[in-house]
Image (cartoon, rainbow, N blue to C red):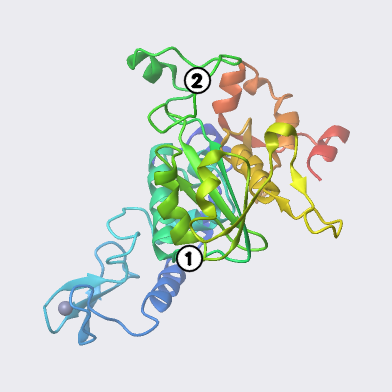
């Protein structure tokens, strides 16, 4: 069922395919119903299974409505889950979850699903919160690594908001504030605890103090675990807390150390350090996000290729910031020799 949410833009008229519109709303609703009530339908208020069907939902004819025989509560297939109360179809939601799984930016998800960025942000946030709420607290063991990184937050890239706060904007090569960064300085520390060959747990901290990290480390790392850190003094009490603590001294250029003489440098925090490099790239606004629509197929280009291709498109020439913040739909370029190279 094709949905038109507003007047079509020129690009929409040229490429009218929206991937969520290709999904069948009835089949999607049945799939959600099957997963949701896998152990039978129960009342969302009193958990009673003594319920009866009560027509279909006002929101969609494909969603079943129920009535509880115990407490008279009316509910439907979506009551009590994140899709509830949204005026977007289940097809939009399912496609959005799929895109979140593909790690697409909110901006690109908004473009794909014809949403505003604000709505896309709200929807992906509710999906991520729901996933996080279902996750149990990890307990790491074996050999764990602890390290902290400082992530720039606040109003970076929004000069108006910075000005309203009567603060100087950050510039490249501007000297940072002295001391360790904190949440109050809009550069919150993030504590990463990784189990080698296992999970990684991340915690945004208000500051980096022993009193802040102690309860986190005690709850996440199993007692008696080998814990590797750098030389930062907040980790000095790990031994007192019941862990086998080893550290490398980055200040003197030591990044990995072989203690048992087997030629394998087992004392290091390179697992977490490697994760930070991925996290920083992931958090950085992408230079160019491009979706190429070609004959009904949708392709997301790797960033480097997208950048190279887009540089040749006159509509995108402009300031660095303009390019960086733009999210575009563009047709497949002419099949020139270079084009073939860019779009295999
Ligand atoms: Zn009930």
Rendered-image quarter of ligand 1? bottom left
Residue visible at 74% across and 42% down in the picture: 255
Residue visible at 85% across and 60% down in the picture: 262
Q: Residue furthest left?
A: 71
Instruction: Locate residue 33, reporting x and y percent.
Output: 38, 75
> Crowdedness of circle 1 by 10 Å Cα count: few (<14), some, many (20+)?
few
SS of the residue at dot 1?
Answer: loop
Residue visible at 22% across and 71% down in the picture: 75
Instruction: Locate residue 209, reporting x and y percent.
Output: 44, 40
- Above or below: residue 40 compared with residue 319: below
Image quarter of the N terminus: bottom left
Residue pointed to by mark 2: 178
- The image quarter in which residue 300 lies: top right
- The image quarter in which residue 149 lies: top right
Q: Nearer the viewer, mark 2 or mark 1?
A: 2
Instruction: Locate residue 323, reporting x and y percent.
Output: 60, 23
Q: Residue 156 versus residue 117: which sits nearer the camera?
A: 156
The answer to whether 57 appears left or right of 127 in the picture is left
Q: Earlier in the sequence, mark 2 or mark 1?
A: 1
- Above or below: residue 275 compared with residue 306: below
Q: CA distance from mark 2 to mark 1?
A: 57 Å
Can residue 1 be seen by looking at this rendering?
no
Residue pointed to by mark 1: 24
- The image quarter in which residue 219 lies: bottom left
The answer to whether 65 appears left or right of 240 in the picture is left
Instruction: Locate residue 125, reporting x and y percent.
Output: 41, 49
Q: Residue furthest front?
A: 240
- Above or below: residue 309 compared with residue 295: above
> Crowdedness of circle 2 by 10 Å Cα count: few (<14), some, many (20+)?
few
């Amino acid at each position: 069922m094709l949905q038109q949410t507003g007047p079509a833009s020129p690009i929409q008229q040229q490429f009218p395919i929206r991937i969520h519109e290709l999904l069948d709303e009835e089949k999607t609703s049945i799939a959600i119903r099957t997963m949701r009530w896998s152990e039978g339908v129960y009342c969302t208020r009193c958990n009673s299974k003594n319920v009866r069907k009560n027509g279909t939902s006002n929101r969609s004819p494909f969603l079943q409505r129920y009535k509880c025989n115990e407490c008279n509560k009316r509910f439907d297939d979506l009551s009590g889950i994140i899709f509830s109360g949204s005026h977007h179809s289940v097809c939009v939601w399912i496609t959005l979850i799929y895109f979140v799984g593909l790690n697409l930016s909110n901006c690109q998800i908004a473009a794909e699903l014809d949403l505003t960025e604000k709505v896309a942000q709200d929807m992906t946030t509710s999906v991520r919160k729901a996933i996080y709420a279902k996750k149990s607290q990890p307990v790491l063991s074996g050999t764990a690594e602890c390290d902290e990184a400082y992530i720039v937050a606040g109003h970076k890239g929004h000069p108006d908001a910075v000005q309203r706060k009567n603060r100087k904007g950050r510039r490249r090569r501007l000297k940072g504030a002295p001391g360790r960064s904190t949440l109050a300085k809009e550069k919150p520390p993030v504590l990463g605890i990784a189990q080698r060959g296992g999970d990684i747990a991340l915690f945004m901290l208000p500051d980096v103090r022993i009193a802040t990290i102690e309860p986190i480390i005690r709850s996440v790392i199993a007692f008696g675990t080998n814990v590797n850190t750098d030389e930062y003094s907040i980790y000095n009490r790990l031994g007192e807390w019941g862990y086998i603590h080893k550290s490398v001294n980055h200040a003197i250029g030591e990044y990995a150390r072989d203690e048992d003489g087997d030629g394998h440098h087992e004392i290091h925090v390179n697992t977490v350090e490697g994760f930070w490099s991925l996290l920083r790239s992931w958090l950085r606004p992408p230079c160019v996000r491009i979706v190429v629509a070609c004959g009904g197929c949708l392709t997301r280009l790797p960033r480097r290729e997208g950048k190279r291709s887009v540089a040749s498109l006159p509509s995108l020439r402009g300031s660095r910031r303009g390019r960086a913040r733009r999210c575009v739909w563009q047709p497949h370029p002419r099949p020139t020799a270079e084009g073939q190279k860019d779009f295999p």
